[in-house]
Every structure is written in structure tokens, then in C-alpha cells.
């Protein structure tokens, strides 16, 4: 346990939505292909208010949105127009360039709503960085799960715990949601070279050490652990094969900084695919 890295997330605000962001950090830039991890904190929106993340660009990554409560409307420059509900996976691969919008759907905007979820970014392998962008939506019922001895596991993306997700990841990946009843235990195997745990709710131990709430515990490679629930707990697990160093600037991820500079210039100049029907956009930060 001495080589366990604990990352305390920093608080941020994304277009009015409060978040906690443990990745990237100075202590750990990535875990497997995961280069970005946003916990969208449970937030109540009054009627007439909600999330409105205007049109913005990406390159070199895949985004994965996964909700616990509420709904979001995803629209992108590929023409996708998809309502995302709790337990669904919204999966967008940017490749050489895509733009998208995420907002509270009109019905919930009128009634008021509550939003709670995660959005993560996975870097693409170098061979896919300039590939075609694409989007796929995976309903909650399509995700594999197991339920035994007080532990429920849902495999969101990749493979692990003898489960395989239908989400089309581009490199070896593990992204799982674990629910543990009070007193339940779960072995954390070393089937992926890089792994991390994020305690979303409850109280849990990793071996005999408490896991801090809303902190990311990066596990040393090649070691197995026992996760134990002191109360009903929900733990997110990420991991996979490392892809090598990646540069990140604003919404752009790439192995070559020149690709990022080109993307910045294109977005600033308006030379970018547009989301149909959208006119507002987030401008390039200075």
C-alpha cells in the first residue's frame, strides 16, 4: 500500500455545472488511456435552468458520458441528436476533429431537474488520432453486469471481471461501476497494467486502508487488492494499457503538439465541422 497514489480532485465549474476533477493532476497525468475524469456533482436545477455546454471542438480522444441522475441531450457535427439517460453510455470519438453540444433537454428545462454523472476522456492510439470521427449510444440494458455475494458490477467500457462491454474502445480499457453492500468484499485483480479507484459514495477499505471519498486511488501495477465496504458503497474503476505521453490543451489531446496547434488555429478561424442547427460556440481561451 505504500506505493498507492491518492489524488485529491480540484473543484471546477463547467458552464455553471460544479465538478470535481482528479485527472489530469501533477501526480498522475493518465491511467491507462484515461486522461481526463470529471465528476459532475449532484446539482438541482430550477425550472428554466439547466446545463448548456455550447458547441466546442475535440481532437485525438474519445469522450464517454455516464449519468447517475438526470438526462442530457447530445448533438454533434456528425448529425447525432441523442437523449442520454441514467446508465446509458454516450460515446464520441473525435479523431481528426468533431464538435458537440451537451444540454438539458427541453422537457426537463421546463420542469426543473437534477443532474449527477461522470464524463471521462480516453486518449486515442496514435494510429487513430487523425481517423474519422464517430458516435455511438449504448442503452443501459446493453451493458453487461454481474451480481454475486453482495457485489454488483456493471462493465461500462472495455473488459474486466469476466465481462466485455459493447462500447467500441480503441485500446485495452477497463471502466466499471461497482456497488458493494455493507460488509461485502471484492477482489481487485491485476488484469490491467494501470488501474485506479474512485469512491463515489459510502465508506470502503482497500485492504485495510480507508479510501477517501471523492479521491482517486491509483494502484501500483502487478498487485492485487481487496475492496471492502464498511457501508453501502459505489466505486468507479478505470484502467487499461498506457498509450504513452499525451499533450492536452483545452479540449484537444494529441501525441504531437503540432496537431494541437493546428486544431487551435482551425477553431479560431472557424474552419471546423459545425453542429447542425447550432450557432453559439465556446471560443478558444487565450
Image (cartoon, rainbow, N blue to C red):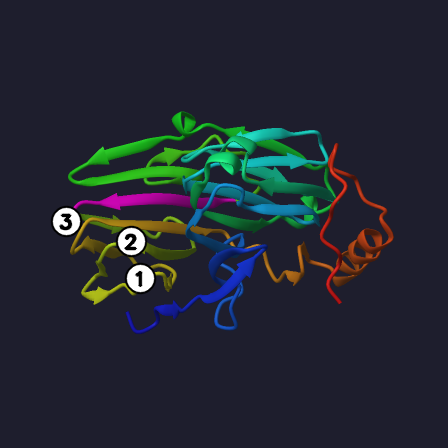
Mark 3 lies on a secondary structure that is: loop
Placement of the N terminus among the 4 image quadrants: bottom left
- Determine if the magenta segment contains residue 132: no
Task: Specify the label residue 201 is tagged with.
Answer: 2
Q: Which residue is mark 3?
A: 182
Image marks 2 and 1: residues in contact by CB distance under 8 Å? yes
- Determine if the magenta segment contains residue 173: yes
Q: Position of residue 76 (x, y in %)?
A: 68, 36
| Callout 1 crowding tier (Cα within 10 Å): few <14, some 14–19, many ≥20 | some
Mark 1 lies on a secondary structure that is: loop
Q: Residue at x 45, y 33 (%)?
A: 85
Query: How far is the residue under mark 3 from the one under mark 1?
Result: 16 Å
Placement of the C terminus among the 4 image quadrants: bottom right
> Foreground: 282 or 268?
282
Q: Residue at x 53, y 45 (%)?
A: 49
Q: Residue at x 70, y 29 (%)?
A: 79
Secondary structure mostly seen in the magenta stretch: strand
Q: Which residue is mark 1?
A: 213
Amino acid at each position: 500500500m505504500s506505493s498507492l497514489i491518492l489524488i485529491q480532485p480540484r473543484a471546477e465549474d463547467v458552464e455553471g455545472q460544479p465538478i470535481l476533477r482528479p485527472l489530469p493532476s501533477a501526480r498522475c497525468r493518465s491511467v491507462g488511456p484515461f486522461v481526463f475524469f470529471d465528476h459532475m456533482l449532484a446539482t438541482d436545477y430550477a425550472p428554466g435552468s439547466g446545463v448548456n455546454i455550447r458547441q466546442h471542438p475535440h481532437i485525438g480522444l474519445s469522450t464517454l458520458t455516464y449519468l447517475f441522475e438526470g438526462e442530457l441531450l447530445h448533438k454533434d457535427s456528425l448529425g447525432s441528436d441523442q437523449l442520454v439517460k441514467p446508465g446509458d453510455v454516450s460515446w464520441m470519438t473525435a479523431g481528426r476533429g468533431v464538435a458537440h453540444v451537451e444540454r438539458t433537454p427541453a422537457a426537463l428545462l421546463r420542469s426543473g431537474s437534477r443532474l449527477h454523472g461522470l464524463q471521462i476522456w480516453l486518449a486515442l492510439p496514435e494510429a487513430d488520432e487523425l481517423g474519422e470521427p464517430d458516435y455511438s449510444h449504448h442503452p443501459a440494458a446493453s451493458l453487461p453486469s454481474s451480481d454475486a455475494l453482495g457485489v454488483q458490477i456493471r462493465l461500462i467500457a472495455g473488459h474486466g471481471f469476466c465481462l466485455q462491454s459493447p462500447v467500441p474502445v480503441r485500446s485495452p480499457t477497463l471502466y466499471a461501476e461497482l456497488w458493494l453492500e455493507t460488509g461485502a468484499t471484492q477482489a481487485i485483480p491485476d488484469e490491467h497494467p494501470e488501474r485506479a479507484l474512485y469512491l463515489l459514495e459510502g465508506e470502503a477499505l482497500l485492504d485495510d486502508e480507508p479510501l477517501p471519498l471523492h479521491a482517486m486511488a491509483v494502484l501500483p501495477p502487478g498487485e492485487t487488492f481487496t475492496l471492502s465496504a464498511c457501508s453501502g458503497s459505489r466505486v468507479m474503476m478505470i484502467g487499461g494499457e498506457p498509450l504513452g505521453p499525451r499533450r492536452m490543451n483545452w479540449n484537444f489531446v494529441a501525441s504531437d503538439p503540432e496537431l494541437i496547434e493546428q486544431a487551435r488555429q482551425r477553431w479560431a478561424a472557424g474552419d471546423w465541422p459545425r453542429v447542425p442547427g447550432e450557432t453559439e460556440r465556446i471560443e478558444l481561451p487565450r
